Image: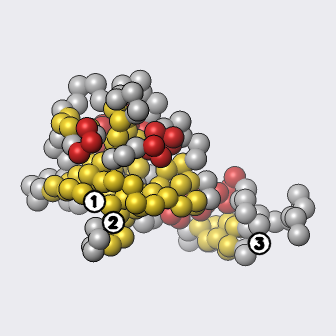
Amino acid sequence: MPRSAKQSSPISSTRSSAGSSEAEVATHGSRIGDDASRAFRDALGQFATGVTILTTRTTDGMPIGVTINSFNAVSLDPPLILWSLSLATAKLAHFRRASHYAVNILSANQAPISECFAAADENPFAGLQIRDGLGGIPLLENCAASFECTPEAEYPGGDHVIFVGRVARFSSTKSQEPLIFHAGRYRSLE
């Protein structure tokens, strides 16, 4: 049964006397209003994440990348990871066609790189040290870790696509602390 315009949003948000937001999620409907959407996003922001740059090459060989924090481990055997990308990004088609891509986990001093890839810069790779990985994918230097992957699966996820990648090769360093994102701000472990 379709929802009428007068029905409530599936997520309603309230503010407690202590200043914290509380929200109740309804089990019907698929869209949420702007106020509830902001409250939902703020609540999700309470989960601290690392910051990654996903990189690949277009079919013309041009390097592309995008900042994401929706990265997670799936399996050790076989080695699988997952990440998601908005359906609205112009770069989606390139990642869907890629034979390889890399997840570059940024180190604590790489917030400016994250900002550069999050913006619509013409060439976010300008001035960066990169090297070629498997399939020619660009790998960012001085990251806390990197994972070179081949596509394993893809799933719909609301306004995002969920990608599962098979890790073909990885590298990490214990000398680099990771960049953290929490409550809308970059943080460090210290």
- Measuring from the top left, give residue 40's x and y in whole percent: 59, 62
The quarter of the picture where residue 1 lies is bottom right
Tell me the residue that label 2 is attached to: 80
Q: Which element type, helix, strand or loop, lies under badge 3? A: loop
Q: Nearer the viewer, mark 3 or mark 1?
A: 1
**Residue 180 makes an appearance in the image:** no
Q: Position of residue 129 (x, y in %)?
A: 18, 32
**Local SS, label 2:** strand
Q: Gap in Å between the C-alphas at discs 3 and 1?
A: 37 Å
Circles 2 and 1: CB atoms closer than 8 Å: yes
Q: In 3D space, how far apart are the residues under numbered discs 2 and 1 (Cα atoms)?
A: 6 Å
Q: Residue at x 53, y 64 (%)?
A: 43
Closest to the camera, between mark 2 and mark 3, is 2
Residue assigned mark 1: 167
**Dot 2, how many residues are within 10 Å of its Cα: few (below 14), some (14-19), or many (20+)?**
some
Colour scheme shown: secondary structure
Residue at image coords 90%, 61%: 4
User: Going 34% across and 53% down the picture, which residue do you hit?
Assistant: 150
